Amino acid sequence: MRIGVVTFPGSLDDVDARRAVRFAGAEPVALWHGDHDLQGVDAVVLPGGFSYGDYLRCGAISRFAPVMTEVVDAATKGMPVLGICNGFQILCESHLLPGALIRNDHRKFVCRDQLLRIENNKTSWTNEYDEGAEVTIVLKNGEGGYVADESTLDMLEGEGRVVARYLGDNPNGSLRAIAGITNDRGNVVGLMPHPEHAVEDLTGPGTDGLAFFTSAIKALANA
Amino acid sequence: MARVVVDVMLKPEILDPQGKAVHGALPRLGFEGITNVRQGKRFELEVEGEITEDRLVEIRKIAETLLSNPVIEDFAVHVPGPHL
C-alpha cells in the first residue's frame, strides 16, 4: 500500500505525515507540487503548513499547483484523499469539499491538544474509529474557522458528512464546532486538527491520530 | 498601460476578525464614532493594450477563479479614471 504526501513550497508537516503513514504500516511516497505525477500511489495526503506563504488566501495558490490536477482527478474517481489543516484549506479552495476556512474568531494562533468526537466512521480515513469515539489530537492553526452557508451546513449534518467535531470550548470559531468534513462519497476528508502529530506517545498527546492512516489502509484493502 | 482594479471583500455575513482588530484599535488612538471596520483586498491589474469588453470578461474570470473565493467573498471590477 503506497500513500503519497504532497510537498508544496511552505508545507511543514509533510515529513510527519510520511512518518505517520509508515507507522500505520503503509509505504510513504513523497510527491512534489510541481509534478503532474502521483507516482501510482493508492491514496494522497495534503499536509499542513503555509503553502505559498498563505498568500492571497490559504490554499488559494496551491489549488493551481500542477500536482493538484492529478489529485482532483483521482479524488473524483474515488481515491482516498486526506487534507490536514492547510490541506483542508486546499481541498475547500479546490471545491472538493464545500465551505471555507477563515481566520480564528479570537484572532490568535491556537496550538493545543484538542478533544474531538468522530461522528462519521464510514469514511476512507475514519473507518477504524468507533462511531462517537472521543479522541485527543493536536490542533494548531491561525485560520481554522470553518464557515459555510446555513443550507450547506444543514446538508453536511443531514448527510452525516461532519466527520469530526470539537468538544469543549470552540477553539477557532468554526460554525457548529466542525473540525472535519467529507465529500458525499466518503473518500475525501478535510480535517483541521493534525492526526499525524498524534501517532506515538513520545512526540504527541498519544496515538489517537494513527487510526486516520490505518483506516485508509483498510479502505484500500477492502476496495 | 491601462489598469483595472479588482476589489475583494468578505461577504457581509462572514466574520472579519482583522476588521474587528482594526476597529478595536481606533478608540485607543482617540478616534471616536467609527461603528465598524471591514477589511478587504485591492488588486491592480496592468493590462496590455486597450481595455475591451472581452478583456473585462477575462478579468472577471480571474477575479472569480483566483482573486476571490466566491464561497466567502464578493468582488467588484473597476476601470479607474480616464485611461489612454
Image (tube, coloured by chain):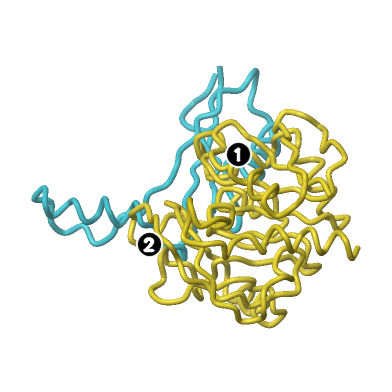
The C terminus of chain B: image quadrant: top right
Q: Residue at x 84, y 49 (%)?
A: A1
Is A25 above or below relative to A222? Answer: above
Figure chain in yellow: A
Tell me the mark number nearer the camera, choosing from 1 and 2: 1
Percent x, y for residue A40?
88, 40
Residue B33 location, quadrant: bottom left
Q: Is residue B38 left or right of residue A64?
A: left
How crowded is the residue under tag 2: few (<14 C-alpha within 10 Å), some, or many (20+)? many
Q: Nearer the viewer, residue A169 or A101?
A: A169
Q: Residue at x 50, y 67 (%)?
A: A136
Q: Which residue is mark 1?
A: A15
- Give the secondary structure at mark 2: loop
Percent x, y for residue A206?
51, 62
Residue placed furthest toward the left: B30
Q: CA distance from mark 1 to mark 2?
A: 30 Å
Identify which amino acid the numbered label 1 is placed on: Val
Is A2 above or below relative to B11? Answer: above
Q: Which residue is mark 2?
A: A105
Identify which amino acid the numbered label 2 is placed on: Asp
- Residues at marks 1 and 2 on the same chain: yes
**The hue in which chain B appears in the rendered picture of the protein:** cyan
Residue A31 location, quadrant: top right
